[in-house]
Image (cartoon, rainbow, N blue to C red):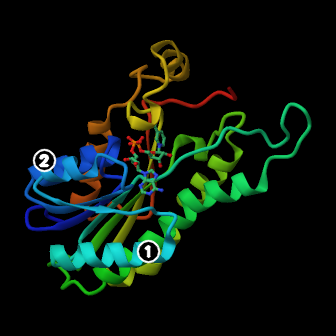
Amino acid sequence: MEIAGSKGIFVGGASGMCRATATQFAEKGGQLAILDLERSDGASVAEALGAKFYPCNVMDFDGMVDVIGQAVEDLGGLHFLVNTAGGAVAQRTLKKGGERHSLDDFRRIVDLNLIASFNINTVAAEHMAKNEPNADGERGVMINTASIAAFEGQIGQVAYTAAKAGIAGMTLTMARDLGTLGIRCMTIAPSLFDTGLTAGIPDEGALQLTKDAAFPRRMGQPHEYATMAIAIFECPMMNGSTLRVDGGQRFAPR
Ligand SMILES: NC(=O)c1ccc[n+]([C@@H]2O[C@H](COP(=O)([O-])OP(=O)(O)OC[C@H]3O[C@@H](n4cnc5c(N)ncnc54)[C@H](O)[C@@H]3O)[C@@H](O)[C@H]2O)c1
């Protein structure tokens, strides 16, 4: 799809990879809305991009229906959804003392990453379905964010791995479900990226975590996620896949 004149919603857009994607989208002539936690930098980021900020929490599943609805109404339509809101908990299946992984923690991480993404996708698809298709029959594009931990989770990442593997797993099925409507669905699986989420990782730790990459052996930069997301939006043949953006990295067990 062509970006100029298109409308996009960026969930998690106050920071990191989603913010970088919103920035590239705006530079290419797209109109957008930033959706993020109230305590985030969403207001100032949105202002800098000539956009409006919509405070929200993706864990409020019903509330997201209203927030997205309001943003779409204000924008006058929806063609692009990028969603990076997510997070992890560090806990082994059996903790070192033999205690079982907390079921509440497991469920919370699945809710935050998988259920929230699916919820946002269904709401976005409902709005995109109302678009007039372009000459190629396209009505919209949705991008979710997994992680290479979806495929090789490290020790202590079992909840995160399950949630992100769920996102990767639903991508083709959702693309097939929405294919007759001309709505595409893709997932990006980053390796370690230099964002708000990883700001606390010291340089030495980052070197350790990226040493197995083929090239480049460093953290990814938010604009590198954005470049991929923009390419997905612009290329009609990109559909139903989870793309690793990882410099050839394969996570070791720890
Ligand atoms: N940075 C990495 O190394 C890395 C690697 C693989 C996958 N990921 C995935 O990328 C996403 C994080 O993006 P980032 O790395 O750009 O981090 P980031 O912290 O810079 O940006 C994430 C944004 O999401 C928002 N957010 C978090 N929880 C939310 C909620 N409940 N409701 C609404 N907004 C919420 C945050 O406020 C933040 O602005 C997560 O899904 C994470 O699993 C990150």
Q: Is residue 169 visible?
A: no
Residue type at tag 2: Ala
Furthest-front residue in view?
Answer: 39
Please tell me which residue is depicted at 53% across the width and 47% down the height of the picture. 87
* CA distance separating discs 1 and 2: 26 Å
Q: Nearer the viewer, residue 70 or 28?
A: 70
**Label 1 CB sits under 8 Å from any ligand 1 atom:** no
Query: Which disc, if any, is residue 63?
Result: 1
Q: Residues within 10 Å of mark 2 (few under 14, many from 20)?
A: few
Quarter holding the C terminus? top right
* Residue occupied by mark 2: 48
Does residue 117 appear left or right of residue 40 in this picture?
right
- Please say if the residues under marks 1 and 2 sit with CB atoms less than 8 Å apart: no
Does residue 197 appear left or right of residue 181 in this picture?
right
Please tell me which residue is depicted at 33% across the width and 40% down the height of the picture. 16
Please tell me which residue is depicted at 23% across the width and 52% down the height of the picture. 43
Furthest-top residue in view?
Answer: 204
Residue type at tag 1: Gly
- Residue 184 position by quadrant: bottom left
Does residue 70 appear left or right of residue 106 in this picture?
left
Give coordinates of residue 67: x percent, y percent: 34, 73
User: Would you place residue 165 above or below residue 129 in this image?
Assistant: above
Give coordinates of residue 109: x percent, y percent: 62, 54
